[in-house]
Amino acid sequence: MSLMTLSIDCGGLYIKACVLDESGTMHATPLRIQTPYPLSTEKFLETLELIQSQLPQSDRVTIGVPGMIRNGVVVATPHYINEAGPHTHMSPELKEQWWGFDLQAAVAVRLGMAAKVLNDAEVHGAGIVTGSGLEIVITLGTGLGFSVFHGGKLSPHFELSHATVRRNTTYDTWIGDRERRRMGNTFWSRRVRLMVSELRPVFLWDRLYIGGGNSHSIQQRDLTLMGDDIVIVPNSAGVTGGVRAWQL
């Protein structure tokens, strides 16, 4: 009998989930709910329980969370430490709860099954990489997600989103959804192309995948100019990657 995986993709604005078998076939209509704020660790676990109750029974759970996640522990995370979500006031109380929180252990106990917690871009990448060469995954949503795979194996995570670009601006801000809305898709798309051209000599990837909810806003002209080693991937990989994440 196939092992069933509950895969949950946690974003700054929405949380998406589905149950999949070992082949990656969905066994329910994907669930999408608004991320509730303020989001304490307890509220987050309650939300996961609610999601679990609305989907078919599963044997294990994979959760993708924004930020620096090491061995299932939240070293640092954005959005969830803010009082009302992305770009709002940071709550010291929420930051104290989230940073250093062993989310993987807490989820395993709360949902009563084996759990794997990774950075959301890492789960996204697990669903799309081919296992050949150096593959980079960028997700474009509220901010910038980033993960690296070599030979199909997940490399140690680092937060490119916090790297400084254009003096005092981070990639998270420079390429994030707020800037896309301010600039409009045409000019924002050119900015994505510029970012790719600047990152290329840093990584010299074999393939760069661009996913996330805003990837569809990249204009065809810019995609063509970026080159054949750039691939736009569906945002659903953030959920379907929940199965392959156990094989990394």
Image: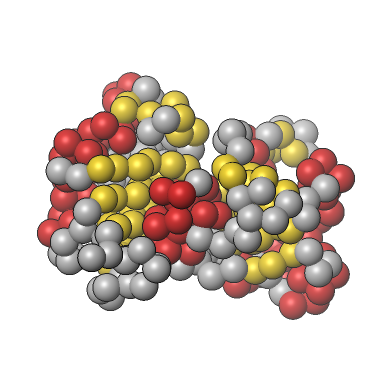
Q: In the figure, residue 113 lies in which quadrant?
A: top left
Is residue 48 rendered to the left or right of residue 99? Answer: left
Marks counted in the figure total 0
Residue 241 at least partly seen = yes
Q: Position of residue 188 (x, y in %)?
A: 70, 62
Between 73 and 36, the one lying in front of the other is 73
Q: In the figure, residue 14 lies in which quadrant?
A: bottom left
Colour approach in the figure: secondary structure
Q: Quadrant of the N terminus?
A: bottom left
Does 40 sit above or below residue 188? above
**What residue appears at the point 70 percent right and 56 percent down from the top-left corner?**
132
Residue 191 at least partly seen = no
**What residue appears at the point 78 percent right and 55 percent down from the top-left corner?**
206
**What residue appears at the point 63 percent right and 55 percent down from the top-left corner?**
131
Q: Position of residue 154 (x, y in %)?
A: 57, 42
Between 243 and 101, the one lying in front of the other is 243
Q: Position of residue 190 (x, y in %)?
A: 78, 63
Does 88 sit above or below residue 54? above
**What residue appears at the point 21 percent right and 58 percent down from the top-left corner?**
58
**Can you name the residue that lies furthest to the front here?**
1
Is residue 65 rendered to the left or right of residue 61? Answer: right
